């Protein structure tokens, strides 16, 4: 398991005004891996993705193949092979599914060897439902179909690293399963994935490597199976298997984790 | 009022209305894509008419200076940005569109003073169109994330700059360009000037072209996508800067064509653009700055209203047209009860 | 945007006022007249500051209101020989009434509509006045009488200067008073979203119209002064270009501060004088160069320093706001809390559809006095929709919501607030430019009665002191007393959430609705918050807690309702709910 490093951050910091939201994150994604970041609401997971995408000003180093040292704009990051599917999906609601997808390939227009039609067929092969609905506007789709469209739109840009922010948000368990399975399938197509999920259990089940974030810092990291078994993670994010015998105020909030960064780094 | 006067007024109203339609459509387009209420849209119109008139009268067109100076500033801003980001990416494109193109067009305009009419029109359109993205780069791009209100104030400030420069470069005299088509025909026993027919036809054709552009091309769809969801557009690689500059080029091109169409029928002064643009607005507001067909119909109605009110109460023509905005807003405020409070 | 109306500097401006009083002794008549002109302009700009910087509205039409004031007095004093002292109230009332009517039409829509509409009516009024024979057309009206006072003729630069100074000083005093009052706090909250004002029971739509009217009346006062100063009016100074220039003054000076109005008026007026004198000579041609320069200056200010010059000056001059002198004291409650265990909020079969989507599906539960009910569920389960239905932001498609037996599901947010249902926001909504104390006092809005006029005239001080003491009391209760004079913007997120609770408590609530109060909090902050909520419960307040953080909610709630797909999945004691297999599956994620 020593695939090449695809992307890496070092001491990544983001400030909202005077408040620092990310306190020097260092994470690493290897080629062909699914890496997941779990953590409570407000831990800074979305901020991390926004910084990686260039949507937020940040300090620290982000390394990605063929990235020069200068700050890259969002569009340049997309062309370099980074793609973000945000929590809000941000589809073009009043436009048909097919237009949404074709616009997904906007950054590749004019590229040698890129064929929008071929990419479209690939996405349709992955999500046949989208092909059925290709003439429908995006805002008439169901929640699951919207997530498929968001994924498909991102894939049109031929990303090397796909970043998914809460893909199961608001989806039924069955649909979540379907989406997660599709995400796992992408890995087999050679796309690396950085997955942020509320549904920590589902995310850890599919991921190769995991980071646990709390209030802007990485608390724990390691192979996904090991993290999923870690008692602190089980307590805080996966939920105790049996009811707590004596719930009291002290137990209410998660116990403070020791700053522990285990194997893998 | 007899039938012939009525027919004449309708013709007049349709001709000016057809131009307002173009302006209204541009305003809606620019606003939805960039959230800028493009007050200087009218300057594209007046500058085009004044430049074409300058060519006809064998004068050096002042527009060349605006183009060169603004283009120089735009390029300097690009240079500064490139220096700060320590990269040379994008400079070549900027050098072409902000330096080389304006320089070439200005050279052509300043040198060739006996161009054929078609070349004059083409050169005029090219110059004004080139000015569009330059203005976006200089005035709006550095504050593209500001609220629509600040963008509107900036638009007004830009309008001030352009009008003030217009007076200096074009002088205070009004111009009328040569008629494109002479003569008239009869439709329903009514004499109809070819010029009028041409304006209406050209407006119709331009609207069709725009419709096709937004409906069928990837670039047009990209602009629409920006209007629908800015962040989504950014995430597929449509940069807001790029979308803004393309939109401004389009708006400037349509403004230039409007100026060439309206030049022979209306006397255009250096500051005529403001009132023309505002009339486009009244139409655009009927569409809530969002809906194209409603905006176009509204603009046509403004043209007709203006024609009839100038017949009955010529002195109050502007009063009537601009007071129309009050009932329109009243209607819209009841039709649309969504109270949008968050200005941040 | 860091706006900060420096409302408490009554000591600050006094030396400046003294200087202004003495200036005519050292300046020549030309400069005295120029100063007078600047002060008239600053009156208009003051109104615009209220509109733009404080309330977040933009109008290019203020010059038209100046014209309305000027023409009213010009017409009535020349045509009807009325005394200028009589035409002043007429001009103010006429302009105010017109503004209220225009505001009622345009202020219901988002900001830029008002701005565009103001361009249109600005032009429209200009041509109307220019074409109406009664007003002398574009030539205007001349022979306006000078002001007289008890037989004294006030014509001439110096006497007029003092009249203008008096009016300006009184206006600034009034506006400062207004901003530092119950109504002022509500006005300052509007630009941060009407939902905030509604949540404390204020009516943002009415307040906007009030501010717009007030701004127009300030413009009318300026117009009245202008008419009797120049003793001649024509349409030009009231045209759209002047309207735009007034807005430039406000923005360049710094629209967020009352004092920016003066800075802007000074800078723009002097700049125009200089440019009009020098530029044509420099460029060898007559032209409108000053508007080019203004345009460029304006673009630079907008791009580089959108807050204008005043904040920059504040930094240089080191102006500081004094500490508040207030002691915590609770106001007597206006309600009697129901007995512990009595149901205060009953949700009965409530449904909400968004188009085809059923966000909340036939949901029923009760909130009891002295209890904490947790509404739990995964993201997108419909919790926030339910919260918005109770707080009146949304209306239910079906079902009933009752508060102490009274139906409230058709009421608007502010009516619900006045019942005694206070809320916080998932995304913290505070007025960043107000202090912690002022933000908390915003919550006590409905516990005061003073209106606009009393506030402007500073007749509200006794009540104001009580409101601030109540706010201080709530700060003490939640543990933010030490931070009372900080700007809300400078608090860390955890304390901002607690401040929202203090504001909600100042409403004097029977029920407290909290929307994800623990989101983004650190462990210690969560513990403190839990402690606070338990204390409130023990004091008899009913709390409805919408949360998504299972650990936080398990420890402090008495009962839980778990939502999933808009429906109730489970209800009961936290321990039972946690053990529920359905909940495990849906909320914690299937394995």
Image (cartoon, coloured by chain):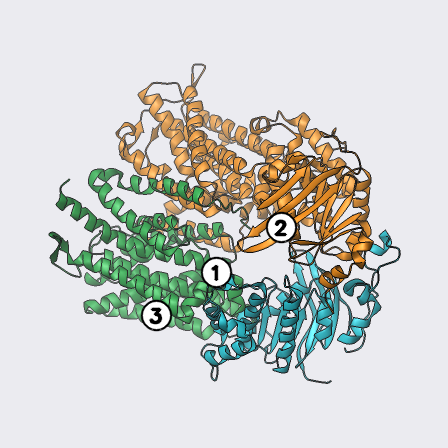
Chain colours: A cyan, B green, C orange
Q: Nearer the viewer, residue C435 or A29?
A: A29
Q: Residues within 10 Å of mark 3 (few under 14, many from 20)?
A: some
Q: Is residue C492 visible?
A: no
Q: Quadrant of residue C232?
A: top left
Residue farthest toward the right in the current orientation of the protein:
A246
Disc 2 on helix, strand or loop? helix
Q: Residues within 10 Å of mark 2 (few under 14, many from 20)?
A: many
Q: Which residue is mark 2?
A: C385
The x, y position of residue A86, in whole percent, is 60, 65
The x, y position of residue C85, in whole percent, is 43, 20
Q: Chain of mark 1?
A: B
Whole-angstrom CA distance, mark 2 to mark 1, is 24 Å
Q: Which residue is mark 1?
A: B228
Q: Quadrant of residue C586?
A: bottom right
Residue at 16%, 48% (x, y): give it.
B8
Q: Is residue A245 above or below residue B306?
A: below
């Amino acid at each position: 398991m020593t695939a090449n490093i695809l992307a890496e951050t070092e001491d990544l910091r983001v400030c909202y005004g005077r408040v620092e939201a990310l306190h020097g994150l260092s994470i690493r994604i290897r080629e062909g891996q699914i890496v997941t970041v779990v953590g409570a609401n407000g831990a800074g997971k979305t901020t991390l993705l926004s910084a990686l995408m260039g949507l937020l000003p940040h300090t620290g180093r982000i390394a990605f193949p063929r990235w020069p040292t200068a700050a890259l704009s969002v569009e340049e990051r997309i062309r370099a092979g980074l793609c973000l599917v945000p929590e809000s999906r941000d589809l073009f609601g009043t436009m048909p599914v097919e237009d949404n997808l074709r616009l997904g390939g906007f950054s590749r227009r004019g590229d040698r060897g890129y064929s929008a039609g071929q990419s479209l067929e690939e996405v349709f092969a992955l999500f046949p439902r989208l092909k059925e609905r290709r003439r429908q506007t995006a805002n008439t789709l169901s929640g699951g179909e919207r997530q498929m469209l968001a994924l498909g739109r991102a894939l049109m840009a031929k990303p090397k690293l796909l970043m998914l922010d809460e893909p199961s948000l608001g989806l039924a368990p069955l649909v979540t399963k379907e989406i997660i399975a599709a995400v796992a399938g992408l890995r087999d197509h050679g796309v690396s994935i950085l997955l942020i999920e509320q549904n920590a259990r589902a995310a850890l089940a599919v991921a190769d490597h995991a980071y646990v974030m709390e209030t802007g810092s990485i608390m724990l990291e390691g192979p996904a199976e090991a993290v999923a078994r870690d008692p602190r993670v089980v307590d805080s994010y996966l939920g105790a298997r049996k009811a707590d015998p004596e719930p009291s105020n002290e137990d209410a909030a998660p116990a403070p984790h020791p700053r522990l960064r285990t194997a893998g780094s | 009022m007899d039938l012939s006067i009525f027919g004449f007024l309708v013709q007049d109203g349709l001709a000016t209305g057809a131009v307002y339609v173009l302006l209204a459509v541009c305003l809606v387009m620019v606003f939805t894509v960039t959230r800028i209420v493009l007050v200087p849209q009218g300057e594209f119109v007046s500058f085009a008419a004044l430049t074409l008139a300058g060519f006809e009268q064998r004068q050096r067109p002042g527009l060349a200076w605006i183009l060169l100076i603004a283009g120089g500033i735009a390029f300097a801003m690009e240079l500064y940005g490139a220096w700060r980001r320590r990269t040379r990416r994008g400079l070549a494109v900027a050098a072409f569109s902000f330096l080389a193109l304006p320089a070439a067009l200005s050279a052509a305009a300043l040198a060739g003073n006996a161009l054929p009419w078609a070349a004059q029109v083409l050169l005029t359109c090219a110059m004004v169109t080139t000015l569009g993205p330059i203005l976006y780069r200089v005035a709006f791009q550095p504050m593209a994330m500001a609220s629509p209100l600040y963008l509107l104030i900036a638009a007004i400030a830009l309008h001030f700059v352009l009008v003030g420069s217009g007076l200096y470069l074009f002088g205070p005299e009004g111009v009328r360009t040569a008629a494109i088509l002479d003569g008239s025909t009869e439709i329903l026993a009514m004499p109809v000037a070819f010029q009028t027919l041409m304006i209406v036809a050209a407006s119709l054709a331009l609207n069709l072209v725009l419709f096709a552009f937004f409906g069928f091309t990837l670039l047009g769809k990209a602009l629409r996508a920006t209007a629908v969801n800015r962040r989504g557009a950014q995430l597929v690689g449509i940069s807001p800067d790029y979308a803004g500059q393309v939109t401004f080029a389009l708006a400037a091109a349509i403004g230039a064509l409007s100026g060439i169409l309206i030049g022979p029928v209306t006397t255009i002064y250096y500051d005529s653009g403001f009132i023309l643009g505002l009339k486009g607005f009244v139409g655009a507001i009927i569409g809530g700055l969002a809906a194209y067909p409603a905006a176009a119909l509204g603009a046509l109605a403004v043209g007709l209203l203006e024609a009839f009110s100038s017949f009955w109460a010529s002195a109050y023509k502007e009063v009537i047209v601009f007071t129309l905005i009050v009932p329109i807003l009243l209607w819209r405020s009841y039709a649309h009860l969504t109270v949008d409070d968050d200005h941040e | 945007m860091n706006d900060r109306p420096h409302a408490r500097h009554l000591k600050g401006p006094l030396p400046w006022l003294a200087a202004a009083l003495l200036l005519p002794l050292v300046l020549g008549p030309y400069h005295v007249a120029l100063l007078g002109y600047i002060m008239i302009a600053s009156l208009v700009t003051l109104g615009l500051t209220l509109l733009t910087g404080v309330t977040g509205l933009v109008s290019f039409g203020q010059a038209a209101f100046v014209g309305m004031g000027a023409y009213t007095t010009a017409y009535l004093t020349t045509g009807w020989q009325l005394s200028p002292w009589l035409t002043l109230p007429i001009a103010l009332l006429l302009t105010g009434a017109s503004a209220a009517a225009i505001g009622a039409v345009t202020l219901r829509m988002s900001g830029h509509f008002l701005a565009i509409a103001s361009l249109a009516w600005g032009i429209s009024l200009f041509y109307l006045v220019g074409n109406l024979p009664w007003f002398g057309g574009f030539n205007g009206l001349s022979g306006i009488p000078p002001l007289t006072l008890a037989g004294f003729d006030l014509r001439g630069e110096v006497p007029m200067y003092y009249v203008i100074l008096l009016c300006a000083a009184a206006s600034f005093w009034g506006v400062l008073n207004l901003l530092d009052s119950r109504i002022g706090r509500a006005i300052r909250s509007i630009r941060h979203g009407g939902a905030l004002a509604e949540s404390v029971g204020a009516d943002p739509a009415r307040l906007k119209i009030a501010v717009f009217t007030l701004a127009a009346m300030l413009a009318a006062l300026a117009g009245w002064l202008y008419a009797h100063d120049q003793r001649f009016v024509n349409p030009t100074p009231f045209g759209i270009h002047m309207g735009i220039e007034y807005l430039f003054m406000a923005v360049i000076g710094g629209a967020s501060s009352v004092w920016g109005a003066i800075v802007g008026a000074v800078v723009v007026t002097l700049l125009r004088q200089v440019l009009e004198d020098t530029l044509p000579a420099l460029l060898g041609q007559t032209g409108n160069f000053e508007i080019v320069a203004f345009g460029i200056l304006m673009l630079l200010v907008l791009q580089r320093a959108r807050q204008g010059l005043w904040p920059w000056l504040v930094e240089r001059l080191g102006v500081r706001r004094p500490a508040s002198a207030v002691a915590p004291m609770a106001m007597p409650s206006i309600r009697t809390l129901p007995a512990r265990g009595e149901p205060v909020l009953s949700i009965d079969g409530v449904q909400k559809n968004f188009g085809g989507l059923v966000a909340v599906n036939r949901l029923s539960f009760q909130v009891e006095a002295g209890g904490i009910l947790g509404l739990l569920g995964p993201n997108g389960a419909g919790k926030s929709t339910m919260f918005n239905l109770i707080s009146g932001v949304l209306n239910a498609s079906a079902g009933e919501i009752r508060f102490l037996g009274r139906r409230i599901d058709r009421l608007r947010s502010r009516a619900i607030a006045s019942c005694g249902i206070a809320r916080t926001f998932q995304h913290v909504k505070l007025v960043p430019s107000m202090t912690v104390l002022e933000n908390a006092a915003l919550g006590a809005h409905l516990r005061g009665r003073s209106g606009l006029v009393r506030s402007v005239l500073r007749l509200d001080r006794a009540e104001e002191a009580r409101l601030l003491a109540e706010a201080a009391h709530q700060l003490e209760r939640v543990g933010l007393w030490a931070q009372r004079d900080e700007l809300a913007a400078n608090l860390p997120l955890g304390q901002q959430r607690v401040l929202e609770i203090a504001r909600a408590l100042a409403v004097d609530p029977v029920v407290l609705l909290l929307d994800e109060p623990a989101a983004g909090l650190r462990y210690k902050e969560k513990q403190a918050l839990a402690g606070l909520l338990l204390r409130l419960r023990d004091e008899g307040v009913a709390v409805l807690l919408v949360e998504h953080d299972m650990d936080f909610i398990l420890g402090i709630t008495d009962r839980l309702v778990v939502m999933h797909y808009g429906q109730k999945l489970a209800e009961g004691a936290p321990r039972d709910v946690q053990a529920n297999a359905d909940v495990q599956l849906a909320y914690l994620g299937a394995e």
